Image (cartoon, rainbow, N blue to C red):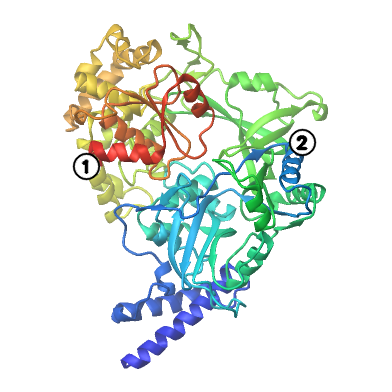
Amino acid sequence: MDRNDVLKRVKKLREELDRHNYLYYVAAKPEITDREYDRRMKELIDLEKAFPEYITSDSPSQRVGGAPLKEFKTIVHKVPMLSLDNTYSREELEDFDGRVKKGLGGEPFSYFVEEKIDGVSIALVYEDGLLKLGATRGDGKHGDDVTENIKTLGSVPLKIPAPGSPYTGPVPSLLEVRGEAYLSKGQFEKINQEKERAGEELFKNPRNACAGSLKLLDPKLVAARKLDALIHGLARCEGKNPPQSQSEAMAFLKELGFKVIPDARIGKGMSEVLGVIDEVEKKRAELPYEIDGMVVKVDSFEDQKTLGMTSKSPRWMIAYKYPAEQAETILESIDVQVGRTGVLTPVANLKPVQLAGTTVSRASLHNQDEIERLDARIGDHVLIEKSGEIIPQVISVNKEKRKSGAAKFVFPKQCPVCGGAVGKEEDPEEDKTEVAVRCLNSLCPAQLKRLLKHFAGREAMDIENLGIAIIDQLVDKGLVKDLADLYSLKITDVEALERMAEKSANNLVGGIGQSKKRPLQRLIFGLGIRDVGVHTAFILADKFRSLEKLSGAAKEDLESIHEIGPKTANSIVTFFKEPSARKLLKKLEAAGIKTDLVEKIAGDNPFRGKTIVLTGTLESMERPAAEALLRKLGAHPSGSVSKKTDILVAGPGAGSKLAKAQELGVQVWDEKKFLSELQKSGVK
């Protein structure tokens, strides 16, 4: 094939792939199978590899994901992405309507009503028809340039009009649209199932999964998540005859090939708006994506300008939030699970029921006291609620439907796994008995399995490939009886496990070996000492400098440390007094684990010695990563605001903590200021 033929074939493949991409993601009318689409995509990628001079930024091949990025660049939004005022009642919607009528001086107007997608806000900028920028909302004024990640979303056109769309008019020289990136309910369940099989922590909800995906620096990983996007706003449009209203803008963008919110519509008055809100709520569970309410906008752009905005949000738009979704079903049985610290947690097994678009068959009952408070019995009709959690909660019992003779649930008197004794322990800090019932056998297999999972976690020893399926086999076969036994595993031991080949076994054993040189705070956290979190482990490592010195610390020494209370001090002393713990430490040292590697705290900086609270959403990094950086700088990350708080870092969505900080006169930083000070301090 000569170069002219290659170029013709490349152009032909691009046209076909663009058209089929539009038909699949936007029009929902696919004409070819996924396999055939993938075959054509592979042919295009192969040709572009052989002839790289033919690669263009709008080629469908660019959706597959390029090389990993080192970091995201910060961009300035030309038009700020302001937050929305929220309301939870019809009365507040009526009040909003009254304010709009007053602001418009009694002139006639209409509303535009659309679903409030529970995702991540994005901005897309097109210049001369080509996608030039995809960005996150950030703090509303500054966001992250995530263009390479946005390109992996099949519903986002790389050029406009999208091939296959019906638009034939002039293309705006500059177009900026706003929308919501999201993860469909089906894809969310699929990802969590894969994470569960791998023994990884599950995503809490689709929004968290989407936000975490967009922050990944490797576009190929983002592409694998299969995110989607719906467009709901027009920020800038430079060209002939721009739209004059929200409804015109959505019709225009849909014609260009954007995937817009499908059931958005005009409401000529608040009564019609309320009718739309009620109608959508009835079919909410059937939607393929999560929504948490409806957005009500004044339709006319001229009216929007007249109404203006506050410093935080537009006066012409409001979000009505739906209450948490609930469903009634039958409690078929109750399982009691054993956690890594021995806590017995009851879980309700339910007759499967649809809730928030997913089939629910389990719900949390929290603890023994909660079962008694609910008086939950097998066969009861129970009301369950899902409010952003992986496992729904049992809210109440419909006792009117209870069958006669239904027996009370008897909480186990022995551990359901090992048969050992159970009981409640004293809380020295609160001077009362704990609510939790615990298995008192530290060698319980259930505790060991969860402890191994915790020990291998990212914030602990970070052992790759050690998932729950492998852990179950290691414990059940007697190959691992405590944490230290991991380090005596041979490749032949691991190869003998189910679904483990030579390469996988080598990778796992190699990962275990690499963990021997983790810093002391990771080891302390990984031991699973009750009440010792990531931050406390860092404090202990910095204070004692070795595991040996920490193991010999007296309760009084521990309580004298900033942020270590009586309860935590008691847990640490109790842990190291156990003969099994002392034996474990000796085995770990004999296995070559470094027990005195302490990360150095940076020198003088604005954070050293300060108590800092993070609240709201940080767009630049996950909160655990931000807290880890603060600890490196000698700061004390805290979860609550008090008079001792020195700085509050407030991102979008900051609520009661921000209000309390302002009330107490605590210094408040936005994320831009926070990142600037981190950069000055030289941390990476």
Q: Quadrant of residue 588?
A: top left
Residue drawn at 49 percent across, 40 percent down: 652
Placement of 451 over or under 317, stated as above or below: above
The label shown at residue 91 is: 2
N-terminal-most mark, 2 or 1: 2
Asked if 127 appears above or below 75 in the picture, the reply is below
Residue 589 in the image: state x and y as whole percent: 18, 27
Q: Is residue 175 above or below residue 372?
A: below
Residue 625 in view (yes/no) = no
Q: Quadrant of the N terminus?
A: bottom left
Q: Quadrant of the C terminus?
A: top left
At label 1, the amino acid type is Gln
User: What residue would you read off at disc 1?
Assistant: 514
- Residue 256, percent across and down? 58, 72
Left or right: 391 in relation to 677: right
8 sits to left or right of 157: left
Question: Residue 166 location in percent, x, y?
Answer: 62, 78
Whether residue 101 is visible: yes
| Secondary structure state at the residue bearing disc 1 | helix
| Apparent side of residue 248 relative to residue 484 in the rendered image (left or right) | right
Structural distance between the alpha carbons of marks 2 and 1: 60 Å
| Image mark count | 2
- Residue type pointed to by label 2: Glu
Q: Where residue 39 sits in the image (x, y, percent)?
A: 45, 77
Look at the numbered disc 2 and give the secondary structure of its residue: helix
